[in-house]
DNA sequence: CACAGAAATGCACACGTTAACAATGCTATT
DNA sequence: AATAGCATTGTTAACGTGTGCATTTCTGTG
């Protein structure tokens, strides 16, 4: 049906081996015949059968980019930046397969034959079993966004805790003492890191936090809205609120303006992530930039290098987060 | 290295043919042996080699989800909803490959052997050559989001023009007569459809638009901000602005508030798409909902059915868009 | 008991590619 | 002129799976 190297061989009057070598730029082949064969292949519109090549070379040319979940807790911007980062790096000869880990009923199809390498954008420990599975099968593996302890992997992680620390400290420096937090999705590592940074900063400055200032959320817009609504009904309202991501911050601001109050006049709000839209909120959101695209790019590069050289450092690399000061925090 | 059907055959004392049949639930095999073989396969932790299977069956188990571009003009929410929609439909036994068409240097790797089917999320005619290429190669093909004329394909498209028409008419009904438009990215089909709907509505109501009320944008936040800034400096400011997507609307609102003005008191703003964040903007954005996730799901379902049955309707199917009234438009 | 027919299994090849090894022809050196 | 050695090409097998056809085994019928 479609053109194979044997068809080319027949037409060129050589063996199919010679064709294979010619097309793969083997130095064994006479430059003249090589050119001739390439010309014929081109004119016949030949495209190699990757299944056959995969079978003999034991390479699939597939890379996996796996998210803990695609349903709740994964924001659109996060997905977007990750895919962009990885796709920018991989060459024309790799396929990028995108999937939520929780969409797999069984990991059966995930193995060395099917994936030359895997990037896990990990958000919670719920994907631990997947990571261990992949590590077990000896699939080249990079884990992004969450530190993994149990298994030795290449591991790139944004320094969330330090970011939250610096942000909270900034709030303190602006004169705030009553600072609440709207937390991320339960069980997500980032939730914990950001809370830890927040607490550390307050403790360092000798500020204690009433229990009511810890409000739970799950990283989506609605939860930010609901959480802020709760805070606003408190008898002792906080003067500033640290939202554990920008989506929730947007929801929180909404809750404030709905009540006829304003940010930052009546209450200050800060976020985390520095999403695309954050600079364009009204007021522009003070937040912490998390370099997801860079992280993804670095992850992909490292993975490719490992696939080629089988060599790498299996250690945790921290990526710097950056305080972005805009207009949603008032100086008291 | 890894387990093959021949290893299982040896252990079970049968031929590898029998193993192959047993694992594929062939009716030719004695139910008892079938169970026995399956048990052995399970205990050996056998996973089939998909390259080998692909080679002989001429199926890759890959589906492609291709965007015109992943760089500019594709918003995060759009990507997110599309991926979610498709991933919800495809079963465990398909891989979803995500990529921007403009990332391909050559379409060499795109062929029937490599893709059982392709979904093109098409935004502009710049991907026309890709669509024709895929159609030429007889790869099962669904095109979403943009009507394709030159080639016969399965084609699902949101009814942008009608949505823009209804939105604009709503603005008129609210008493607006001076209505500007911030347009989408040049060359995108959706840009044209939305502009057409806008013009049609105004013409129908006998309202003429000064040239200065057409401002160009490119679907991203910055361009919305810049465009609105221009409009605000006009001597005859419009009372309402139709932004061709929600991202630009957010940027536009920002430009308004920066000048100490307010939406919708001083100027009304409407968007298009109904992004996740639109309900949470301040004020909540009046917009048109575009059912991208449903569209993607329908596209994926149709594609899978076609792959199985080789049968389908190759015609354009319009998906209804829906006016979503919130708080960003004032009644004059 | 013979035999037809069905049920179950095996043999051998195919899919398209790469690669180890063999074979050929040519050049240069003695 | 013989031979070593290099450049170039061909032969053959292998990767792991599925399938047409042949073969064996079983079952029931006359």
Image (tube, coloured by chain):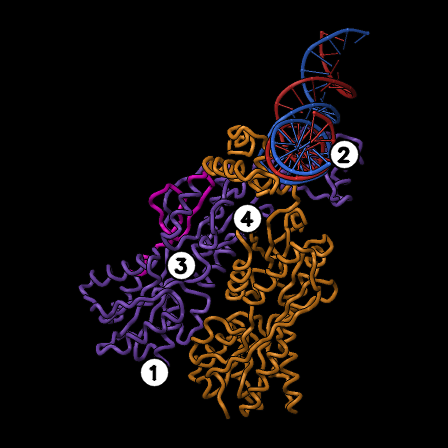
Chain colours: A orange, B purple, C blue, D red
The mark that comes first in sequence, 4 or 1, is 4
C30 or B70, nearer to the observer: C30
The mark that comes first in sequence, 2 or 3, is 2
Q: Taking A53 as reference, is A112 above or below it?
A: below
The residue identified by callout 2 is: B9
Marks 4/1: CA distance? Answer: 49 Å
The mark that comes first in sequence, 4 or 2, is 2
Labelled pair 3, 1 in contact (Cβ < 8 Å): no
The residue identified by callout 3 is: B290
The mark that comes first in sequence, 1 or 2, is 2
Label 2, secondary structure: give it.
helix
The residue identified by callout 4 is: B90
Labelled pair 4, 2 in contact (Cβ < 8 Å): no
For this view, does B78 lie left or right of residue A194?
left
- Residue at (42% x, 39% y) in the render: B136
Q: Which tag is nearer the camera, tag 3 or tag 1? A: 1
Marks 4/3: CA distance? Answer: 22 Å
């Amino acid at each position: 049906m479609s053109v194979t190297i044997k068809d080319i061989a027949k037409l060129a009057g050589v063996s199919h081996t010679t064709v294979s070598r010619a097309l793969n730029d083997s130095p064994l082949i006479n430059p003249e015949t090589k050119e001739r064969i390439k010309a014929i292949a081109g004119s016949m519109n030949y495209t190699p059968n990757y299944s056959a090549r995969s079978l003999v070379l034991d390479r699939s040319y597939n890379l996996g980019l796996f998210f803990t979940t695609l349903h709740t807790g994964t924001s659109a911007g996060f997905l977007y930046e990750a895919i962009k980062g990885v796709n920018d790096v991989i060459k024309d000869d790799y396929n990028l397969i995108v999937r939520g880990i929780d969409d797999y009923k069984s990991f059966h199809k995930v193995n060395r034959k099917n994936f030359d390498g895997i990037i896990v954008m990990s958000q919670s420990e719920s994907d631990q079993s997947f990571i261990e599975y992949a590590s077990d099968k000896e699939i080249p593996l990079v884990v992004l966004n969450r530190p993994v302890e149990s298994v030795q992997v290449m591991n790139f992680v944004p320094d969330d805790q330090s970011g939250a620390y610096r942000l909270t400290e900034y709030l303190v420096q602006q004169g705030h003492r009553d600072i609440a937090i709207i937390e991320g999705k339960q069980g997500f590592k980032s939730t914990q890191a950001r809370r830890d940074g927040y607490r550390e900063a307050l403790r360092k400055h000798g500020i204690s936090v009433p229990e009511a200032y810890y409000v739970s959320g799950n990283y989506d817009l609605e939860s930010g809205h609901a959480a802020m609504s709760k805070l606003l009904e408190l008898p002792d309202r906080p003067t500033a609120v640290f939202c554990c991501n920008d989506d929730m911050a947007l929801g929180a601001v909404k809750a404030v303006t709905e009540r006829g109050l304003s940010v930052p006049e009546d209450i200050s709000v800060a976020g985390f992530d520095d999403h695309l839209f954050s600079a364009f909120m009204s007021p522009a959101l003070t937040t912490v930039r998390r370099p997801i695209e860079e992280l993804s790019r670095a992850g992909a590069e490292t993975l490719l290098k490992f696939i080629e050289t089988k060599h790498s450092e299996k250690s945790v690399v921290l990526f710097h987060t950056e305080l972005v000061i805009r207009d949603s925090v008032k100086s008291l």
